Image (cartoon, grey):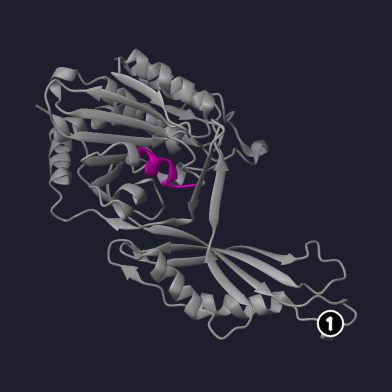
């Protein structure tokens, strides 16, 4: 497989816009590529994730490699120097929305898997191009894991070709306060729910959050606050809704996180705290939903898979540095919830993701193809 093919495949993926729930064009590109690579099985599940399977020449374990199809919107279009959906090549980079997160990763992964002859590995390789990761992290992969039982999972995300062995979790929190409406000329007749929310916010901001030697401290950040009614006009707000995002530590459960937040506002009347519920209609017509809680995780210290991968990367002349991800990924489902040995790996940097003029370096993209082939050799090589 030529270097030109890897680059052109990445460009083709970028040229297929794929917001969450609208990944069908990118999915078609992946289906064609899997057929070209002569995968033994190619299918699309009920939510639109594309799943390809290659069987090796001898019995062995199952390795699942996952990268997501969807991208965030291309905003501030007047600031882009490169069309977000052209996949333009300039300065030894490929430019466009998703170039780094996650279409360059998917291109390198699929080409790496497709280029390994079946007689050189045992067991089977599953590649999933999953949907809706950007807004329902882990939900589509959870459905895939309900159908397959991999011994090891590689989640493709931009890690600078460092092996990701730990990750913070994330929780979307909704705080709601209730008051009583009144005319703003007689506010004493009402009960302003925004003032009640201010008290709740002050308590939440003063929380001491857990920390981790590898991942740093937890974060709780206010991202949205809206009064009810909105616009308010001449009405004292009878309600107020705020949204927080918490970056959690490995080992923290839904119950622990929610209890800590609820205890922080204990004693304040008419204040509720709960996780957000996320829902997205997929391009297949089916609806995917999940509680907005993404578990943090650490790779097991004696993980034999991890040791094999690092050794094979070293033999291939690639980096053996490890990486702790401060952001959420689908690995939260495989590692944090299911307890399946998992690592994160891919070309590009998270600093390039979701930005104006997103890009991926061509040399790193090409190197990722070689790196994924090395990972396959480490896990399934004969």
- Give the x, y percent position of residue 21: 56, 36
Q: Which image quadrant is residue 210 in? A: bottom left
**Horizontal side of residue 150 vs 346, given as left or right:** left
- Give the x, y percent position of residue 170: 44, 58
The residue that mark 1 highlights is 187
Label 1, secondary structure: give it: helix
Which region of the structure is painted magenta? 136-144
Q: Quadrant of the C terminus?
A: top left
Question: Magenta stretch: residue 142 in it?
Answer: yes
Whether 366 is drawn above or below 379: the answer is: above
Question: Magenta stretch: residue 127 in it?
Answer: no
Residue reaching furthest to the right = 185
- Give the x, y percent position of residue 168: 37, 58
Q: Which image quadrant is residue 194 in? A: bottom right
Whether 299 is drawn above or below 381: the answer is: below
Viewer-side residue, 4 vs 180: 180
At x 15% / y 25%, what residue is drawn?
Answer: 121
Q: Quadrant of the N terminus?
A: top left
Viewer-side residue, 64 vs 314: 64
Q: How many residues crowd around disc 1 within 10 Å: few (fewer than 14), some, or many (20 or more)?
A: some
**Horizontal side of residue 346 vs 88, given as left or right:** left
At x 17% / y 23%, what residue is drawn?
Answer: 56
């Amino acid at each position: 497989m030529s270097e030109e093919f890897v680059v052109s495949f990445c460009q083709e993926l970028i040229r297929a816009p794929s917001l969450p729930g609208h990944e069908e064009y990118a999915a078609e590109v992946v289906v064609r590529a899997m057929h070209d690579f002569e995968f033994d099985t190619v299918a699309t599940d009920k939510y639109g994730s594309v799943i390809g399977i290659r069987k090796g020449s001898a019995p062995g374990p199952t390795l699942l490699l996952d990268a997501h199809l969807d991208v965030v919107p291309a905003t501030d279009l007047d600031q882009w120097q490169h069309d977000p959906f052209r996949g333009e090549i300039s300065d030894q980079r490929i430019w466009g929305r998703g170039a780094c997160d996650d279409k360059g990763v998917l291109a390198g992964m699929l080409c790496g898997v497709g280029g390994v002859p079946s007689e050189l590995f045992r067991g089977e390789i599953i590649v999933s191009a999953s949907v809706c990761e950007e807004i329902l992290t882990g939900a589509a992969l959870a459905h895939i894991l309900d159908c397959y039982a991999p011994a090891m999972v590689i989640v493709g995300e931009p890690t600078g070709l460092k092996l990701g062995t730990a990750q913070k979790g994330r929780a979307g929190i909704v705080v709601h306060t209730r008051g009583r409406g009144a005319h703003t000329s007689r506010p004493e007749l009402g009960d302003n729910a925004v003032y009640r929310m201010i008290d709740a916010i002050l308590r939440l901001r003063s929380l001491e959050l857990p920390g981790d030697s590898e991942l740093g401290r937890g974060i709780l950040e206010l991202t949205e606050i809206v009064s009810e009614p909105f616009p308010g006009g001449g009405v004292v707000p009878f309600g107020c809704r705020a949204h927080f995002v918490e970056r959690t530590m490995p080992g923290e459960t839904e119950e622990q996180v929610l209890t800590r937040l609820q205890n922080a506002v204990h004693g304040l009347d008419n204040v509720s705290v709960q996780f957000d519920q996320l829902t997205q209609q997929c391009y297949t017509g089916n609806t995917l939903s999940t509680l907005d809680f993404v578990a943090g995780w650490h790779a097991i210290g004696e993980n034999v898979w991890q040791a094999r991968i690092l050794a094979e990367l070293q033999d291939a002349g690639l980096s053996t540095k490890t990486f702790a991800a401060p952001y959420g990924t689908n690995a939260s489902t495989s590692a944090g919830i299911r307890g399946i040995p998992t690592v994160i790996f891919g070309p590009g940097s998270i600093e390039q993701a979701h930005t104006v003029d997103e890009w991926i370096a061509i040399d790193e993209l090409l190197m990722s193809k070689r790196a994924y082939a090395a990972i396959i050799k480490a896990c399934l090589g004969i």
